[in-house]
Image (cartoon, helix red, strand yellow):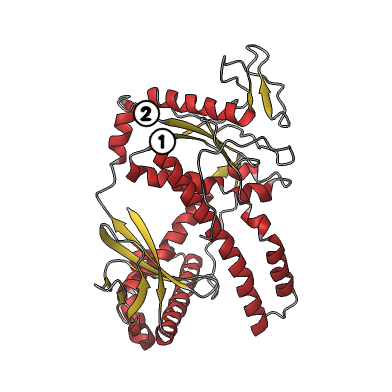
Amino acid sequence: MRTYRFRIYPSNRQISMLESTINLCRELYNAMLQQRIYAYKLGRKINYNSQQDEIPEIKNAFPEYLSIHSQVLQDIARRMDRAYANFFRRMGEKKNGERAKAGFPRFKSRERYNSITYTQSGFKITDNGHVWLSKIGEIRMFMHRPIIGEIKTLSIKRDKVGDWFITLTVETDSIPDKSEEAETMQDSQFQPVKPVGIDMGLKSIITTSDGSQIEPPHFLIKSERKLKRAQRNLSTKKKGSGKREKAKTKVAKVHRKIERQRDDFSHKLSNSLLGDHDLIVFEDLNIEAMVKNHHLAKSIADASWNRIVKFTTYKAESAGVVVVLVDPRYTSQQCSGCGNIMHDLKLSDRIYHCNACGLTIDRDLNAAINMKRKGMEKLEEPMNVGRGTPEITPVEIGSIPARANLVVETGSPLL
Protein backbone atom coordinates (compact mmCIF):
# COMPACT_ATOMS: atom_id res chain seq x y z
CA MET A 1 0.00 0.00 0.00
CA ARG A 2 1.24 3.47 -0.91
CA THR A 3 -0.19 6.95 -0.43
CA TYR A 4 -0.05 9.94 -2.76
CA ARG A 5 -0.78 13.47 -1.59
CA PHE A 6 -1.66 16.22 -4.06
CA ARG A 7 -2.72 19.83 -3.76
CA ILE A 8 -6.15 20.63 -5.20
CA TYR A 9 -7.58 24.02 -6.19
CA PRO A 10 -11.39 24.01 -5.84
CA SER A 11 -13.42 26.96 -7.08
CA ASN A 12 -15.34 29.18 -4.68
CA ARG A 13 -18.52 27.20 -5.36
CA GLN A 14 -16.70 23.91 -4.78
CA ILE A 15 -15.11 25.22 -1.57
CA SER A 16 -18.58 26.10 -0.30
CA MET A 17 -19.81 22.59 -1.16
CA LEU A 18 -16.79 20.92 0.47
CA GLU A 19 -17.10 22.96 3.65
CA SER A 20 -20.82 22.24 3.83
CA THR A 21 -20.14 18.52 3.37
CA ILE A 22 -17.49 18.49 6.09
CA ASN A 23 -19.75 20.37 8.48
CA LEU A 24 -22.67 17.97 7.90
CA CYS A 25 -20.35 14.99 8.36
CA ARG A 26 -19.08 16.49 11.61
CA GLU A 27 -22.63 16.90 12.92
CA LEU A 28 -23.44 13.29 12.00
CA TYR A 29 -20.26 12.10 13.73
CA ASN A 30 -21.21 13.94 16.92
CA ALA A 31 -24.74 12.52 16.72
CA MET A 32 -23.36 8.99 16.41
CA LEU A 33 -21.11 9.57 19.41
CA GLN A 34 -24.06 10.89 21.43
CA GLN A 35 -26.10 7.85 20.40
CA ARG A 36 -23.40 5.49 21.65
CA ILE A 37 -23.18 7.32 24.98
CA TYR A 38 -26.96 7.11 25.50
CA ALA A 39 -26.99 3.46 24.46
CA TYR A 40 -24.30 2.63 27.00
CA LYS A 41 -26.30 4.28 29.78
CA LEU A 42 -29.38 2.29 28.76
CA GLY A 43 -27.44 -0.97 28.58
CA ARG A 44 -27.83 -1.32 24.81
CA LYS A 45 -25.08 -2.31 22.40
CA ILE A 46 -24.37 -0.30 19.24
CA ASN A 47 -21.70 -1.12 16.67
CA TYR A 48 -20.66 -0.06 13.19
CA ASN A 49 -23.27 -2.16 11.37
CA SER A 50 -26.19 -0.82 13.39
CA GLN A 51 -25.17 2.81 12.84
CA GLN A 52 -24.46 2.24 9.17
CA ASP A 53 -27.91 0.71 8.66
CA GLU A 54 -29.52 3.88 10.01
CA ILE A 55 -27.94 6.13 7.37
CA PRO A 56 -30.78 5.69 4.80
CA GLU A 57 -33.31 6.75 7.45
CA ILE A 58 -31.17 9.78 8.30
CA LYS A 59 -31.09 10.80 4.63
CA ASN A 60 -34.88 10.55 4.46
CA ALA A 61 -35.34 12.59 7.62
CA PHE A 62 -32.73 15.21 6.73
CA PRO A 63 -32.70 15.94 2.97
CA GLU A 64 -29.46 17.91 3.19
CA TYR A 65 -27.58 14.60 3.54
CA LEU A 66 -28.80 13.56 0.09
CA SER A 67 -26.10 15.85 -1.35
CA ILE A 68 -23.35 13.68 0.21
CA HIS A 69 -22.16 10.46 -1.40
CA SER A 70 -23.19 7.32 0.46
CA GLN A 71 -19.58 6.10 0.79
CA VAL A 72 -18.66 9.30 2.61
CA LEU A 73 -21.49 8.86 5.09
CA GLN A 74 -20.62 5.21 5.70
CA ASP A 75 -17.04 6.22 6.45
CA ILE A 76 -18.31 8.41 9.30
CA ALA A 77 -19.69 5.31 11.04
CA ARG A 78 -16.41 3.53 10.32
CA ARG A 79 -14.44 6.43 11.82
CA MET A 80 -16.60 6.36 14.94
CA ASP A 81 -16.11 2.61 15.31
CA ARG A 82 -12.37 3.02 14.91
CA ALA A 83 -12.31 5.73 17.60
CA TYR A 84 -14.04 3.37 20.05
CA ALA A 85 -11.72 0.50 19.15
CA ASN A 86 -8.68 2.68 19.81
CA PHE A 87 -10.19 3.78 23.12
CA PHE A 88 -10.59 0.22 24.36
CA ARG A 89 -7.13 -0.67 23.07
CA ARG A 90 -5.57 2.19 25.05
CA MET A 91 -7.44 1.08 28.18
CA GLY A 92 -5.48 -2.17 28.13
CA GLU A 93 -2.09 -0.53 27.62
CA LYS A 94 0.29 0.29 30.44
CA LYS A 95 3.25 2.65 30.60
CA ASN A 96 5.90 2.23 33.28
CA GLY A 97 3.70 -0.34 34.99
CA GLU A 98 0.75 2.07 35.30
CA ARG A 99 -2.38 2.29 33.22
CA ALA A 100 -2.28 5.41 31.08
CA LYS A 101 -5.24 7.70 30.37
CA ALA A 102 -7.28 6.06 27.63
CA GLY A 103 -8.82 9.20 26.16
CA PHE A 104 -12.54 8.75 25.47
CA PRO A 105 -13.69 9.77 21.94
CA ARG A 106 -14.54 13.46 21.98
CA PHE A 107 -17.11 15.54 20.20
CA LYS A 108 -15.59 17.26 17.19
CA SER A 109 -15.51 21.02 16.81
CA ARG A 110 -15.07 22.76 13.47
CA GLU A 111 -11.32 22.87 13.99
CA ARG A 112 -11.01 19.16 14.77
CA TYR A 113 -13.04 17.74 11.90
CA ASN A 114 -11.62 18.73 8.51
CA SER A 115 -11.65 15.71 6.19
CA ILE A 116 -13.92 13.29 4.35
CA THR A 117 -13.18 9.97 2.64
CA TYR A 118 -14.49 8.15 -0.42
CA THR A 119 -13.81 4.52 0.44
CA GLN A 120 -14.69 2.58 -2.72
CA SER A 121 -16.34 4.70 -5.37
CA GLY A 122 -17.55 8.20 -6.12
CA PHE A 123 -14.22 9.56 -7.42
CA LYS A 124 -12.11 9.39 -10.56
CA ILE A 125 -8.79 10.76 -11.82
CA THR A 126 -9.46 12.38 -15.18
CA ASP A 127 -7.23 12.24 -18.25
CA ASN A 128 -6.10 15.85 -17.75
CA GLY A 129 -4.77 15.08 -14.27
CA HIS A 130 -7.69 16.53 -12.32
CA VAL A 131 -9.97 14.73 -9.86
CA TRP A 132 -13.71 14.20 -10.23
CA LEU A 133 -15.81 13.79 -7.08
CA SER A 134 -19.41 12.68 -6.93
CA LYS A 135 -21.84 15.42 -5.83
CA ILE A 136 -19.07 18.03 -6.21
CA GLY A 137 -17.67 17.84 -9.74
CA GLU A 138 -14.24 18.10 -11.34
CA ILE A 139 -11.59 19.87 -9.23
CA ARG A 140 -8.31 21.17 -10.57
CA MET A 141 -5.40 19.18 -9.14
CA PHE A 142 -1.61 19.49 -9.36
CA MET A 143 -0.50 15.88 -9.96
CA HIS A 144 3.26 16.30 -9.65
CA ARG A 145 4.02 12.57 -10.05
CA PRO A 146 2.29 9.62 -11.73
CA ILE A 147 0.09 7.28 -9.73
CA ILE A 148 1.25 3.65 -9.89
CA GLY A 149 -1.27 1.03 -8.80
CA GLU A 150 -4.98 0.71 -8.12
CA ILE A 151 -6.61 3.51 -6.12
CA LYS A 152 -8.53 2.14 -3.12
CA THR A 153 -9.57 5.24 -1.15
CA LEU A 154 -9.51 9.00 -1.58
CA SER A 155 -9.48 11.48 1.31
CA ILE A 156 -10.02 15.24 1.05
CA LYS A 157 -8.56 17.40 3.78
CA ARG A 158 -8.54 21.08 4.58
CA ASP A 159 -5.45 22.21 6.50
CA LYS A 160 -5.43 24.87 9.20
CA VAL A 161 -4.44 27.56 6.71
CA GLY A 162 -7.36 26.81 4.39
CA ASP A 163 -5.57 24.96 1.58
CA TRP A 164 -7.06 21.73 0.24
CA PHE A 165 -5.32 18.40 -0.40
CA ILE A 166 -6.30 14.90 -1.44
CA THR A 167 -4.66 11.70 -0.23
CA LEU A 168 -4.90 8.59 -2.40
CA THR A 169 -4.35 5.14 -0.93
CA VAL A 170 -3.00 2.93 -3.69
CA GLU A 171 -2.41 -0.81 -3.84
CA THR A 172 0.58 -1.78 -5.98
CA ASP A 173 2.47 -5.00 -6.61
CA SER A 174 5.77 -3.28 -7.44
CA ILE A 175 6.95 -3.36 -3.81
CA PRO A 176 8.90 -6.43 -2.65
CA ASP A 177 7.03 -8.69 -0.26
CA LYS A 178 8.16 -8.08 3.32
CA SER A 179 7.87 -11.75 4.14
CA GLU A 180 10.26 -12.65 1.32
CA GLU A 181 12.70 -9.99 2.52
CA ALA A 182 12.51 -11.40 6.05
CA GLU A 183 13.22 -14.92 4.76
CA THR A 184 16.19 -13.59 2.81
CA MET A 185 17.59 -11.99 5.95
CA GLN A 186 16.90 -15.11 7.98
CA ASP A 187 18.77 -17.32 5.52
CA SER A 188 21.70 -14.84 5.48
CA GLN A 189 21.50 -14.64 1.69
CA PHE A 190 21.72 -10.87 1.73
CA GLN A 191 25.36 -9.76 1.68
CA PRO A 192 25.63 -5.95 1.86
CA VAL A 193 28.30 -4.31 -0.25
CA LYS A 194 27.96 -0.73 1.01
CA PRO A 195 26.68 -0.91 4.61
CA VAL A 196 26.59 2.17 6.81
CA GLY A 197 25.86 2.85 10.45
CA ILE A 198 24.29 6.15 11.45
CA ASP A 199 24.55 7.89 14.80
CA MET A 200 22.02 10.64 15.46
CA GLY A 201 22.80 13.66 17.57
CA LEU A 202 22.17 17.36 18.06
CA LYS A 203 25.60 18.78 17.23
CA SER A 204 25.59 16.75 14.01
CA ILE A 205 22.15 15.50 13.08
CA ILE A 206 23.73 12.35 11.64
CA THR A 207 27.25 10.91 11.69
CA THR A 208 27.87 7.97 9.38
CA SER A 209 30.35 5.17 9.87
CA ASP A 210 32.32 6.36 6.84
CA GLY A 211 33.05 9.70 8.52
CA SER A 212 30.36 11.93 7.02
CA GLN A 213 28.57 14.46 9.18
CA ILE A 214 25.48 16.56 8.46
CA GLU A 215 24.84 19.69 10.47
CA PRO A 216 21.31 20.18 11.81
CA PRO A 217 19.27 22.79 9.88
CA HIS A 218 17.53 24.24 13.01
CA PHE A 219 14.34 25.19 11.18
CA LEU A 220 12.37 25.84 14.38
CA ILE A 221 15.11 27.92 15.95
CA LYS A 222 15.48 30.04 12.82
CA SER A 223 11.73 30.73 12.68
CA GLU A 224 11.31 31.09 16.45
CA ARG A 225 11.30 34.90 16.47
CA LYS A 226 8.62 35.05 13.78
CA LEU A 227 6.60 32.37 15.56
CA LYS A 228 6.74 34.18 18.91
CA ARG A 229 5.65 37.43 17.30
CA ALA A 230 2.64 35.71 15.70
CA GLN A 231 1.73 33.98 18.97
CA ARG A 232 1.94 37.21 20.96
CA ASN A 233 -0.30 38.87 18.39
CA LEU A 234 -2.78 35.99 18.75
CA SER A 235 -2.86 36.26 22.54
CA THR A 236 -4.10 39.88 22.35
CA LYS A 237 -7.13 39.08 20.19
CA LYS A 238 -10.61 38.54 21.62
CA LYS A 239 -11.90 34.98 21.44
CA GLY A 240 -14.49 34.47 18.75
CA SER A 241 -13.52 37.59 16.80
CA GLY A 242 -12.55 37.71 13.13
CA LYS A 243 -9.15 39.20 13.96
CA ARG A 244 -8.38 36.23 16.19
CA GLU A 245 -9.13 33.84 13.32
CA LYS A 246 -6.73 35.77 11.10
CA ALA A 247 -4.07 35.70 13.81
CA LYS A 248 -4.52 31.92 14.22
CA THR A 249 -4.01 31.50 10.49
CA LYS A 250 -0.70 33.41 10.68
CA VAL A 251 0.53 31.13 13.47
CA ALA A 252 -0.54 28.07 11.48
CA LYS A 253 1.36 29.33 8.42
CA VAL A 254 4.59 29.58 10.41
CA HIS A 255 4.15 26.04 11.75
CA ARG A 256 3.32 24.77 8.26
CA LYS A 257 6.48 26.30 6.80
CA ILE A 258 8.62 24.65 9.49
CA GLU A 259 6.88 21.33 8.84
CA ARG A 260 7.49 21.56 5.11
CA GLN A 261 11.14 22.49 5.62
CA ARG A 262 11.64 19.43 7.82
CA ASP A 263 9.93 17.20 5.26
CA ASP A 264 12.07 18.59 2.44
CA PHE A 265 15.29 18.12 4.40
CA SER A 266 14.35 14.58 5.48
CA HIS A 267 13.38 13.56 1.95
CA LYS A 268 16.67 14.79 0.48
CA LEU A 269 18.72 13.23 3.26
CA SER A 270 16.96 9.86 2.94
CA ASN A 271 17.42 9.90 -0.84
CA SER A 272 21.15 10.54 -0.40
CA LEU A 273 21.51 7.65 2.04
CA LEU A 274 19.58 5.24 -0.17
CA GLY A 275 21.55 6.18 -3.24
CA ASP A 276 24.92 5.41 -1.66
CA HIS A 277 24.25 2.31 0.49
CA ASP A 278 22.48 -1.05 0.39
CA LEU A 279 22.32 -1.53 4.18
CA ILE A 280 21.47 1.33 6.55
CA VAL A 281 21.65 0.82 10.31
CA PHE A 282 19.86 3.29 12.61
CA GLU A 283 19.75 3.33 16.39
CA ASP A 284 16.37 2.46 17.86
CA LEU A 285 15.82 5.65 19.85
CA ASN A 286 13.13 6.10 22.49
CA ILE A 287 12.40 9.69 21.51
CA GLU A 288 9.30 9.90 23.72
CA ALA A 289 11.50 9.44 26.80
CA MET A 290 14.27 11.70 25.48
CA VAL A 291 12.04 14.77 25.08
CA LYS A 292 11.34 14.65 28.82
CA ASN A 293 14.73 16.37 29.16
CA HIS A 294 13.38 19.93 29.12
CA HIS A 295 16.81 21.41 28.41
CA LEU A 296 17.07 19.59 25.07
CA ALA A 297 13.43 18.85 24.18
CA LYS A 298 13.16 21.68 21.66
CA SER A 299 16.39 20.71 19.88
CA ILE A 300 15.36 17.03 19.83
CA ALA A 301 11.99 17.87 18.30
CA ASP A 302 13.62 20.18 15.76
CA ALA A 303 16.09 17.46 14.73
CA SER A 304 13.23 15.24 13.45
CA TRP A 305 15.15 11.99 13.92
CA ASN A 306 12.04 9.85 13.68
CA ARG A 307 11.06 11.54 10.42
CA ILE A 308 14.43 10.68 8.85
CA VAL A 309 14.18 7.04 9.90
CA LYS A 310 10.56 6.82 8.73
CA PHE A 311 11.23 8.30 5.29
CA THR A 312 14.33 6.17 4.77
CA THR A 313 12.51 2.99 5.83
CA TYR A 314 9.52 3.27 3.52
CA LYS A 315 11.66 4.33 0.55
CA ALA A 316 14.05 1.44 1.14
CA GLU A 317 11.34 -1.07 0.20
CA SER A 318 11.16 0.33 -3.32
CA ALA A 319 14.91 0.92 -3.62
CA GLY A 320 15.89 -2.62 -2.60
CA VAL A 321 17.80 -1.36 0.45
CA VAL A 322 17.64 -3.00 3.88
CA VAL A 323 17.10 -0.78 6.95
CA VAL A 324 17.91 -2.21 10.38
CA LEU A 325 17.25 -0.72 13.84
CA VAL A 326 19.67 -1.74 16.58
CA ASP A 327 19.93 -1.26 20.32
CA PRO A 328 21.95 1.94 20.97
CA ARG A 329 23.24 0.88 24.39
CA TYR A 330 27.01 1.14 24.82
CA THR A 331 27.57 2.19 21.21
CA SER A 332 29.43 5.30 22.39
CA GLN A 333 31.16 3.70 25.38
CA GLN A 334 32.44 0.66 23.47
CA CYS A 335 35.68 0.96 21.51
CA SER A 336 35.12 0.28 17.80
CA GLY A 337 38.67 -1.09 17.56
CA CYS A 338 39.05 -3.57 20.43
CA GLY A 339 35.57 -3.76 21.98
CA ASN A 340 36.62 -2.34 25.36
CA ILE A 341 33.80 -0.53 27.22
CA MET A 342 34.59 2.67 29.11
CA HIS A 343 31.83 3.10 31.70
CA ASP A 344 33.24 6.39 33.01
CA LEU A 345 32.79 8.19 29.69
CA LYS A 346 30.89 11.47 30.10
CA LEU A 347 28.57 13.15 27.60
CA SER A 348 30.96 16.09 27.49
CA ASP A 349 33.78 13.85 26.20
CA ARG A 350 33.42 14.36 22.46
CA ILE A 351 36.68 12.56 21.57
CA TYR A 352 36.90 8.88 22.46
CA HIS A 353 40.26 7.78 23.95
CA CYS A 354 40.39 4.02 24.51
CA ASN A 355 42.42 3.15 27.63
CA ALA A 356 43.00 -0.38 26.32
CA CYS A 357 44.21 -0.08 22.73
CA GLY A 358 44.88 3.67 22.60
CA LEU A 359 42.37 4.39 19.81
CA THR A 360 41.49 8.09 19.47
CA ILE A 361 38.37 8.81 17.46
CA ASP A 362 35.37 11.13 17.30
CA ARG A 363 32.75 9.90 19.77
CA ASP A 364 29.86 9.99 17.27
CA LEU A 365 31.96 8.29 14.58
CA ASN A 366 32.88 5.56 17.07
CA ALA A 367 29.18 5.01 17.82
CA ALA A 368 28.30 4.88 14.12
CA ILE A 369 30.94 2.21 13.49
CA ASN A 370 29.62 0.15 16.39
CA MET A 371 26.07 0.41 15.05
CA LYS A 372 27.24 -0.74 11.64
CA ARG A 373 28.79 -3.79 13.27
CA LYS A 374 25.60 -4.46 15.26
CA GLY A 375 23.53 -4.21 12.10
CA MET A 376 25.73 -6.74 10.33
CA GLU A 377 25.44 -9.10 13.29
CA LYS A 378 21.66 -8.69 13.32
CA LEU A 379 21.51 -9.74 9.67
CA GLU A 380 23.50 -12.88 10.43
CA GLU A 381 21.57 -13.78 13.60
CA PRO A 382 18.23 -11.94 13.68
CA MET A 383 17.08 -11.40 17.23
CA ASN A 384 14.51 -9.24 19.00
CA VAL A 385 16.76 -6.71 20.62
CA GLY A 386 15.30 -4.59 23.42
CA ARG A 387 15.27 -0.84 23.31
CA GLY A 388 18.02 0.68 25.39
CA THR A 389 18.74 4.09 26.85
CA PRO A 390 19.99 6.35 24.08
CA GLU A 391 22.56 9.05 24.50
CA ILE A 392 22.03 12.71 23.74
CA THR A 393 24.78 14.69 22.07
CA PRO A 394 25.01 17.98 23.98
CA VAL A 395 24.70 21.14 21.94
CA GLU A 396 26.89 23.29 24.15
CA ILE A 397 30.11 21.47 23.30
CA GLY A 398 32.30 22.96 20.59
CA SER A 399 31.82 21.52 17.14
CA ILE A 400 34.19 19.01 15.59
CA PRO A 401 35.24 19.68 11.98
CA ALA A 402 32.73 17.98 9.73
CA ARG A 403 33.73 15.61 6.97
CA ALA A 404 30.67 15.88 4.76
CA ASN A 405 30.52 13.39 1.93
CA LEU A 406 26.73 13.61 1.77
CA VAL A 407 25.48 16.88 0.34
CA VAL A 408 21.96 17.76 1.44
CA GLU A 409 20.34 20.98 0.33
CA THR A 410 17.93 22.56 2.77
CA GLY A 411 14.86 24.22 1.44
CA SER A 412 11.18 24.69 1.89
CA PRO A 413 9.72 21.79 1.46
CA LEU A 414 -6.75 10.56 7.62
CA LEU A 415 -8.39 10.18 9.20
Query: In the figure, 408 relative to 322: above or below?
Result: below
Identify which amino acid the numbered label 1 is placed on: His
Question: Going by the image, does 414 lie left or right of 97?
Answer: left
Which structural element holds mark 1?
A: loop
Asked whether residue 354 appears in the rendered view, the answer is yes
- In the rendered image, which residue does mark 2 sit on? 192
| 234 or 23: nearer the viewer | 234
Q: Residue at coordinates 70% horizontally, 44% vertically from top-left?
A: 293
Tell me residue 265's x, y (percent): 52, 52
Q: Quadrant of the C terminus?
A: bottom left
Residue at numbered disc 1: 277
- At mark 2, the secondary structure is loop
Assess disc 1: are there few (<14), some (14-19) or many (≥20) residues with their C-alpha within 10 Å of its C-alpha: some
Residue visible at 70% across and 45% down in the picture: 296
Give the image location of residue 347, x and y in percent.
71, 31
Residue type, numbered disc 2:
Pro
Rounded to the nearest whole Å, what is the CA distance between mark 2 and mark 1? 8 Å
